[in-house]
Amino acid sequence: MPNGIVIIDKPAGWTSMDVCAKIRGILREKRVGHGGTLDPMATGVLPVFVGRATRAVEFAENGRKEYDAGLRLGLTTDTQDVTGTVLETRPVTAGREDVEAALAGFRGDIQQVPPMYSAVKIQGKKLYELARRGKEVERKPRPVTIYGLELLEAESETDFRLRCLCSKGTYIRTLCHDVGQALGCGGTLYSLRRTMAAGFTLAEAVTLGEVQEKGESLLRPLDSLFAGYPALTVRSPGQEKRVRCGNPISLPGTADGTYRIYGQDGEFLCLSRGAGGTLTSIKNFFGA
């Protein structure tokens, strides 16, 4: 059965679940999931997990993400992007220096109010379901972190390209909206391309057409998701048995931290946390 990760360059007009359904059909594997939703208008890096690798989806979703985003000033829509209904247009007097100055206020730890057109749930209802019925409800601000935010290019008097490196849960649409509000003319997202997610970049991404042509040969091993962590191999069959039974193992002298643990035959067994020379499994990845 196919197991692994394929990094898709998601095309515009597809939902993330559309991509999963397509790969499910190509590889004939029911267990397929993605590591971080992209809106239909967005393109770029979408890690897709197949087979046993779906156990690792949660780790991909929680990582940092990077985007190339288009901010259009002077326009406000109900969805906070150009696919929505225009609510207001205003003249734009802000220039490149004004935009750069405004961006400074959105770096670091900030608060975002989730957009109504989002999958956030309030009292069991998804916000976009309420929005489609013409309802708007109060949303509490949520903390997100903007690790990097810079102006890449001024494409016109109203259109500006931004690079944003951010935490899980950041809405780039909302960021554009809020920057526009700070500048006093309104703003909306006109383009979005994810350039990095879960440590994978566009340079590693393939198209759905390539997956159709080459199939599971494009799957990366599951442990590639955790390449940033050091690797340890169990020292004996007894230790490997303990790991496979979900028990901690002792490796004196091991520094505290997170490790990839491998069996004596090289099989990736689990992600473990080391503390005081004892390694305890965070998540097991062996088995069917």
Image: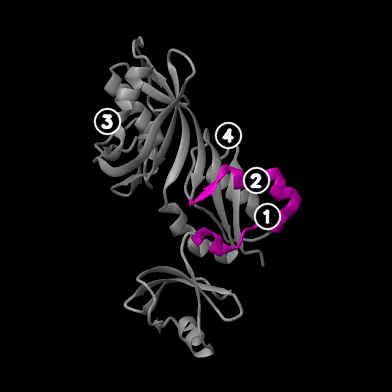
Q: Locate the N terminus and report the quarter of the image it occupies.
A: bottom right
Magenta part mainly helix, strand or loop?
helix
Disc 2: which residue: 206
Image location of residue 163, percent across then percent down: 44, 33
Question: Distance from label 3 to label 1 (Cα)?
Answer: 41 Å
Image location of residue 18, percent across then percent down: 58, 45
Is 272 left, or right, of 9 in this rendering? Answer: left
Image location of residue 20, percent across then percent down: 58, 50
Q: Is residue 122 visible?
A: yes
Amino acid at pointer 2: Val
Q: In the image, what residue occupies the spot 27% across and 43% down? A: 142
Question: Distance from label 4 to label 3 (Cα)?
Answer: 30 Å
For the magenta stretch, what is the residue range? 198-227
Camera-nearest label, 2 or 3: 3
Question: Distance from label 2 to label 3 (Cα)?
Answer: 36 Å
Nearest to N terminus: mark 1 or mark 4 = 4
Q: Locate the C terminus and report the quarter of the image it occupies.
A: bottom right
Question: Distance from label 4 to label 2 (Cα)?
Answer: 14 Å
Question: To which quarter of the image does residue 268 belong?
Answer: bottom right
Nearest to N terminus: mark 2 or mark 1 = 2
Magenta run includes residue 137: no
Q: In the image, what residue occupies the spot 52% across and 71% down? A: 285
| Placement of 67 over or under 17, stated as above or below | above
Q: Secondary structure at mark 3?
A: helix
Disc 4: which residue: 12
Instruction: Determine whether label 2 and label 1 are within 8 Å by CB.
Output: yes
Disc 3: which residue: 105
Camera-nearest label, 3 or 1: 3
Amino acid at pointer 3: Gly
Amino acid at pointer 1: Leu
